[in-house]
Amino acid sequence: MEKVIKINGSNLTIEDVIAVARYNVKVELDENQKKEVLLCREFVENAIKNGQAIYGINTGFGKFSDVAISDEELDLLQKNLIYSDACGVGEPFETEVVRAMMLLRANAIAKGFSGVLVETIECLINMLNKGVHPIVRSKGSVGSSGDLCPLAHMVLPMIGEGEAEYKGQVMPGKDAMEKAGVQTVKLRAKEGLALINGTQAMMGNAVLAVYDTEKLLKQADVIGALTVEALQGIIDAYDERVHKVRPHKGQLDSAENMRAILAGSKLVTKQGEKRMQDGYSLRCIPQVHGASRLAFDYVKSVIETEINSVTDNPLIFRGENGACISGGNFHGQPVAIAMDTLGILVSEIANISERRIERLVNPSLSNLPAFLVKNGGINDGFMIPQYVAAALVSENKVLAHPASVDSIPTSANQEDHVSMGTIGARKARQILDHAQHVISIELLTASQAVDFGDPDKLGKGTKIAYKKLREKVDFMENDVIFYPDMDKAFDLVKSEEMLKAVENEIGELK
């Protein structure tokens, strides 16, 4: 039976989002939730009939919140909102980000506090299931009042406007909807605002980044362990007793991973056997990787909460004391700080990886041939890949400057503090991409170094990682055009192929 993810606003997971965004798993609106959506919509329509003034329903937006809108113009107000807010710039978001945005927005408004029609939620779901992907320009959100600009671009094809990608071709949104057989919608009172006043552009990026970072942290332990063996590192540094007396969870987990990955290794050494201590980039792997793991746990908890949160404005509360309340759940500050933190913690994973690469290629720091090549001079070996890693970690240091510490007033100072969370999420993914490249360069470099010894002596986990690389990349006898091999190593990291093989052999890593 084909897998289907049912959304109700309450139990969507990071893994669910990945399944839909990357692997096109089908989506349904939970039948039990439709009643809640209908009752919320009924509340909105009754409030309009009763002449109640409600922000964004029969008033203008932002600084225009005191401007009354006539009943005859309520639907026009929502259409104009989408038109005016669809003013993004920059390259479009990748398809997987757009799909994540669509799913997350549908889930949030399905919770039953936004006042939309069931048909509007189902339009988004049908677009996902039929593969109609709005072209969403990536820049233009300040991350408060929701991601107005990118989400407006997402909505345009829903009303037969804008552009969308369908079956690999970009076309007018109306044409894409018609070709896919998805019915467009006419936005009613409150609906335009409900669709765009949320954090789903930053969250589309954030969920993908969190998922990939969790895999990166495990892979960094695996590849770091391979470097330890290539350099005949001292295994005593990962002794459980050391870490129990400084019991940060991330450090304990990373050290446990190192012991499991290196189990059975005949390449590691004991303290005093060859030297008394290793350099910090080897000896302190659990401490450095572990600190990033601690920060990551905080980031993940924020994103898991936000996935099933209602982030538009105003919010509809039914019941005996029913009310339509203007609040600030659209403000992206929780996600903004989390994404800045993610950028910093991932930058450090890349930083220490680059230092390990330097130890591998620098003959003054190892007993290996200079730049890991037999005939140095006529061959440069692994000299320049280290330059690439250095360039990437240096760029990360610029990108890791927090976006959330900035704010600039908008809407004539009505919206006088904003989060810049979407900027933070976009650059966190860029930092992550760089880090994946850096650790894949370390994987190539460490494997080359191991081949100057005996790969059969590798530990239980590192042997699998080494073999997975060697299935795709040969030992480099003489200089070759490097980037194809770098791409293959990167794909191993990006696809999780190597990590899955390691975990199949030694069990799931922490």
Image (cartoon, rainbow, N blue to C red):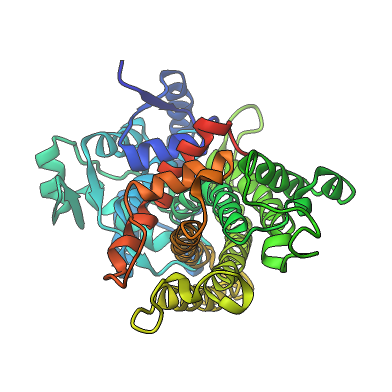
Q: Position of residue 223 (x, y in %)?
A: 54, 53
Residue 67 in view: no
Up the image or down, 273 lies above or below 212; here it is below
User: Looking at the rendering, in which quadrant would you find the C terminus?
Assistant: top right
The front one of 359 and 368 is: 368
Q: Residue at x 58, y 33 (%)?
A: 508
| Residue 310 placement, left or right of 249 | left
Up the image or down, 173 lies above or below 142; here it is above
Residue 488 in view: yes
| Residue 268 placement, left or right of 39 | right
Furthest residue in direction top, as rendered: 1
Q: Position of residue 146 (x, y in %)?
A: 49, 57
User: Looking at the rendering, in which quadrant would you find the N terminus?
Assistant: top left
Report the number of discs.
0
Q: Quadrant of residue 490?
A: bottom left
Furthest residue in direction bottom, as rendered: 377
Up the image or down, 119 lies above or below 142; here it is above
Q: Quadrant of residue 150?
A: bottom left
Q: Quadrant of residue 117?
A: top left
Q: Residue at x 17, y 52 (%)?
A: 173
Q: Position of residue 472 (x, y in %)?
A: 32, 50
The front one of 129 and 215 is: 215
The front one of 209 and 419 is: 209
Q: Residue at x 48, y 65 (%)?
A: 438
Q: Position of residue 392 (x, y in %)?
A: 47, 74
